[in-house]
Amino acid sequence: MSIDEILEEMDELLDKASSVPFASHKKVIDGERMRELINDVRLNMPHELKEAKKIEFDCQRILNEAKLNAESIIRKAEERAAQIVSREAIVTEAKKKAVDMLTKAQAAAKNLQKNAAESVNKMLADTESHYARNLQSIRMVMAKLSSTTGAGNNGGNPMGGGITNINIK
């Protein structure tokens, strides 16, 4: 079932609900059925949201691997430098190479982290754009719902009777 179909079923559930005595703007609905519909919406969330969560996990994994790789390179550089300590000229050269390797490792780690962050930012921006379009569709459905439930009889509630205090950001 698509999200639109689920929302349509929620509309029908509200339309068929009976009014609360002395509070005609409030409705009594089947809570269990509404919870089922909400769970259906969660299960039918767009693939992009699931993909964004996977990307976030992959980014963290890549950053951790880069950090471990950098630490491994640093450790190897330190071990090699310790082996060469026996001669003064070699020690000087080893220190230069160790610093160079450390600098390269740090630069490579920073570059990898930067690239991963840029990639995640782009993917999150794409996901945000997709959700903005979905939000706009939901708002249009809500506006249609409020116009079909008689917005004038609900005490200023744009959702008509039955649904109160819904905030979508």
Image (cartoon, helix red, strand yellow):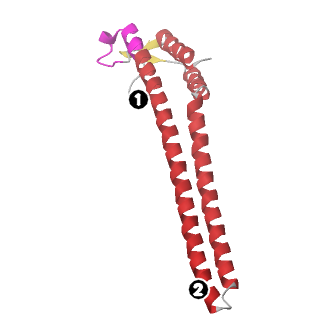
Question: Can you say whether 115 is above or below 13 in the image?
Answer: below
| 19 is within the stretch colored magenta | no
Is any part of residue 58 visible from this angle?
Answer: yes
Residue drawn where x is 57% and y is 79% of the image: 96
Identify the residue under disc 1.
168
Q: Which residues are magenta?
A: 143-158
Residue drawn where x is 62% and y is 81% of the image: 94
| 151 is within the stretch colored magenta | yes
Query: From the image, which quarter does the N terminus lie in?
Result: top right
Q: SS for tag 2?
A: helix
In this picture, residue 167 sits left or right of residue 13:
left
Residue drawn where x is 60% and y is 47% of the image: 57
Where residue 145 appears, as percent x and y from the top left, is 42, 13
Where residue 59 appears, as percent x and y from the top left, is 58, 48
Label 1 with label 2: CB-CB less than 8 Å: no
Near-viewer residue (82 or 7): 82
Residue drawn where x is 39% and y is 29% of the image: 167
Identify the residue under disc 2.
92
Query: From the image, which quarter does the C terminus lie in?
Result: top left
Q: Amino acid at mark 1?
A: Ile
Where residue 86 appears, as percent x and y from the top left, is 68, 91
Near-viewer residue (77 or 113): 77
